[in-house]
Image: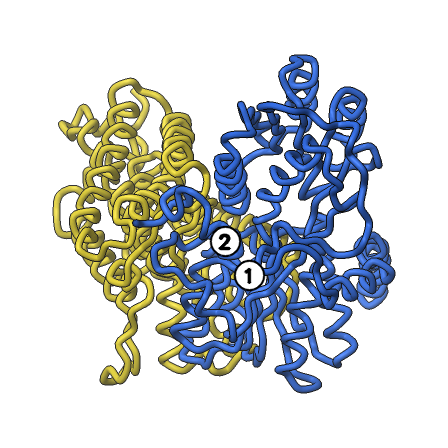
Chain colours: A blue, B yellow
Amino acid sequence: MKLKIILAASVALACTGEALAQNFNDPAEFKKQREQLSMKPQGPEGKPWAQHLGDGMVDTAKYKKDGPVTLCFSNAGVFNPWRVVGLNNLNAEAELHKDRIKELVVVDAEGKDEKQISDIEALVSGGRCDALIVSPNTTAALTPAVEAACGKLPVIVFDRGVNTQCPVTYIHPVGGYGFGITSGEFIASKLAKGDNVLALRIMPGVDVLETRYSAAKTIFDEAGINVIGSEFTGSDRAKTKSIVEDYINRGEKIEAIWMDAGDTATAALEAFEDAGLPYPVISGEDQQDFLRKWQSEKLTAVGPSYPTYQWRTAIIAALDVLDGKQVPGPEWVLPQPAITEDVLAEFVDERMPPLHYSLCGCQELPGYPERWGGKK
Amino acid sequence: MTPIPQVAPLRPSPKLALNAGLVIFVVLYAAIAVVQPNYLEPGLFMNFLRRAAPLLILACGQLYVILTGGFDLSVGAVATLAVLAASILINGDPDATWAVLGTLYLMGIAVGLVNGLVVAFLKVPSIIATLGTMLLVNGLALAWSGGAARGDLPENFRNFGRLVWRDVWLIGSLPLAVVVLCGFVAIAWWGLNGTVYGKRALAVGDNPRAAELAGTPVAATRIIAFVVSSISAVTTGILLGGFSGVSVNAGEGLELQAIAACVVGGAQLLGGRGSIWSAVFGALSLFALFTLLNLMGLPQALRDSIQGAILIVAVGATMWRNRRRI
């Protein structure tokens, strides 16, 4: 009887697992992003925020507007450090173009779909905006509002997309699969077949995070690496550390830690320190605290990124469109570099706060480092 | 005239209190040792104590309030506030640590005073009063920190949760958190057994009206209980911050675990019975249960459900035992 229940439960679990996996495990997209990672970007050397992958360009002559312009930005919110860094990038980039931009109007939707929908409607009907930049809170809910805006003025979307082709261009880095491929391949290259990796993830059900995991999992499975656990940390340091410590106390050997975001990477490493164990191979992200730890402890690590410099690109694209220049489109795919051993030293900056995203492309922007919370 | 009913003894015999929690703890720890024999090594036992220390300290503070017949639901929020306040005020500067520790305790005492005054003088039931302070303190912490981990905790603050002396005679290793834990338990024990306060607290919890007529300072007894509880919450916060650094939900859910720990250990909800060992062994039992479920490798969702079921059984059994005894 007991056995039957367990069997039934595991079948049920396997089925739901399958259903979820299908949503977030698209082999075609995986393949496309893997190719994009190795593609040579076009555009100015050393300025990844102005570069693009692929050849598609769109004509924008019909949007040309002379004289000072007003840019409007509908932001999903600033509810995490990534978006805080991003918004600073966007404001600083706008400051570079003072002569061209009369005004930059930023409206914060505080993470609410309905607020962002009414924000966009208000911006469009207000008649002040010459171009609209949107960073959508969720894809499906914002699509109609963006479609309505497209009829009135040029729209540029970045970060999360919308289900319509009407924006002039949609700016985004390679994507979640790319993140998982970079980190998964690094760990697979450092581990032997049959070694254990512990996957630490922020939360279930978020597309950009699920695709990171599904890509890494695909690579681990191919390489015969054993994923001993996939746990959700809620991005909380205390929880992360106890989860890792729990696994260590179970007596399982952990050769590597894979993370879908790096903000709690140092907490995961502390669990190894406290247990008196050597550091595992680890994939984090581009946060300062992780990079410093990596440098001082000489870790075997990689820092894939979902670069915040795309917030700069949004302003660049809006101005290019109003200049009537051709812009990459309908998707402007930005390169998505990872921090590796060789370039680590370039990105460590003791002045910056622990959760500063180092691939911000903001070192040359006005107000660095104070604008990003750094010490002079 | 009705005959005067037999009053429960003011102080339960220590042997009975020991039995409740200690037995559960020993059984659970034996189960842990079966699943993972190296938990019998002193090093891992010390590590177990270190990780259980925040809950233990919180339970000791909570016990004061439970003895006087109340609840303190605000302790989790106070612990979170302590972590966030420490990281924002210290902001990575090791020289600021000691001054900030003092500030944290002042903040804790203030919250305890508010709880105590509201319960003692406005006669608000403690469960409502401390629910209010819980929301208030959580809101303050959220507003102050902007809802995200800010600032940084320097090494000397982190030591409260992380420093371990190795090669200690007999026990192998000794975490600083365990020293803090022993110190706190000793002071809490002394407060209840070495001073007149313990008897007053039990009297107030057992029958506040009778205690008042007998000349016990009821209001002061209650207020002190809430202050002790808040102080324990700040201490817990310091250990949690030391253990894992800045976290916006460091103390989440701890208040209920602390109350459950006291009850599992044999303290009587709504007051009048219990000793410091109820809190100590109750918390140890609870933490041993968490550890055991983790070692068995059960998925998180299942662990939570089993935890809940076992808690209900344990608390139910204790209540049933207590009822029979009366």
Residue type beneath disc 1: Glu
Indicate the secondary structure of the residue bearing disc 1.
loop
Q: Nearer the viewer, residue A36 or A284?
A: A36
**Chain letter of the residue carrying label 1:** A
The x, y position of residue A203, in whole percent, is 63, 51
Tell me the residue at 81%/22% (across/down). A151
Residue type beneath disc 2: Tyr
Residue B26 in view: no
Q: Nearer the viewer, residue B31 or A208?
A: A208
**Chain letter of the residue carrying label 2:** A
Q: Nearer the viewer, residue A42 or A210?
A: A42
Question: How far apart in space, not on screen, are marks 2 and 1 (Cα)?
Answer: 8 Å
- Residue matched to label 1: A285
Vertical arrangement, residue B87 with respect to residue A318, above or below: below
- Work out whether disc 2 and disc 1 sit on a shared chain: yes
Q: Nearer the viewer, residue A42 or B250?
A: A42
- Residue matched to label 2: A357
Along the horizontal axis of the image, is A307 left or right of B235? right
Number of marks:
2
Mark 2 / mark 1, whichever is N-terminal: 1
